[in-house]
Amino acid sequence: QVQLVESGGGLVQPGGSLRLSCAASGSIFSMIAMGWYRQAPGKQRELVAVYTSRGSTNYADSVKGRFTIIRDNAKNTVYLQMNSLKPEDTAVYYCYLRATWGPASGSWGQGTQVTVSS
């Protein structure tokens, strides 16, 4: 069973930074996809940043140049470094992992709240 433990959310002022962490219960070396999604109140869940098995990374246009996804295979952890945060980045951020050793549809973390406000 895949378990994903997220941490690092909180309240930050506009222009500030946060770093989210997502630790997986198994190896991410052979993952198919792993990354971050977010859901703001009244909106659909959307992709923020994701690694693919081909070694590429995809970012939402709204976060390019501000957010960076970082992978640490030794710790089975993926990070999301978020800089120059804006109020519109406020959302619950979810970690997602699709691995060869987990369910075909992938697995989600419990979510961590990020609030950008002065």
Image: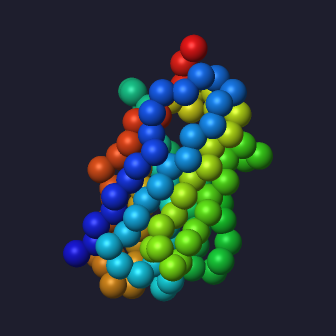
The reply to whether residue 102 is visible in this rendering is yes
- Please, is residue 97 above or below residue 13 in the view? below
Looking at the image, which residue is at 58% across and 68% down? 71
**Picture quarter with the C terminus:** top right
The image quadrant of residue 44 is: top left
How is colour applied across the structure in the image?
rainbow
Quarter occupied by the N terminus: bottom left
Q: Is residue 67 above or below residue 58?
A: above
Q: Residue, x 47% and y 67% (percent of image)?
A: 77
Report the label total.
Answer: 0
Q: Position of residue 14 (x, y in %)?
A: 64, 23
Residue 47 in the image: x percent, y percent?
53, 50
Residue 105 in view: no
The residue positioned 30% from the left and 50% from the top of the image is 110
Q: Position of residue 63 (x, y in %)?
A: 67, 43
State the residue at coordinates (45%, 74%). Answer: 76
Residue 90, position as x, y percentages in the image: 50, 29
Q: Is residue 1 left or right of residue 31?
A: left
Q: Say if 43 sits above or below 24 in the image.
A: above
The answer to which image quadrant residue 66 occupies is top right
Say left or right for 103 vs 37: left
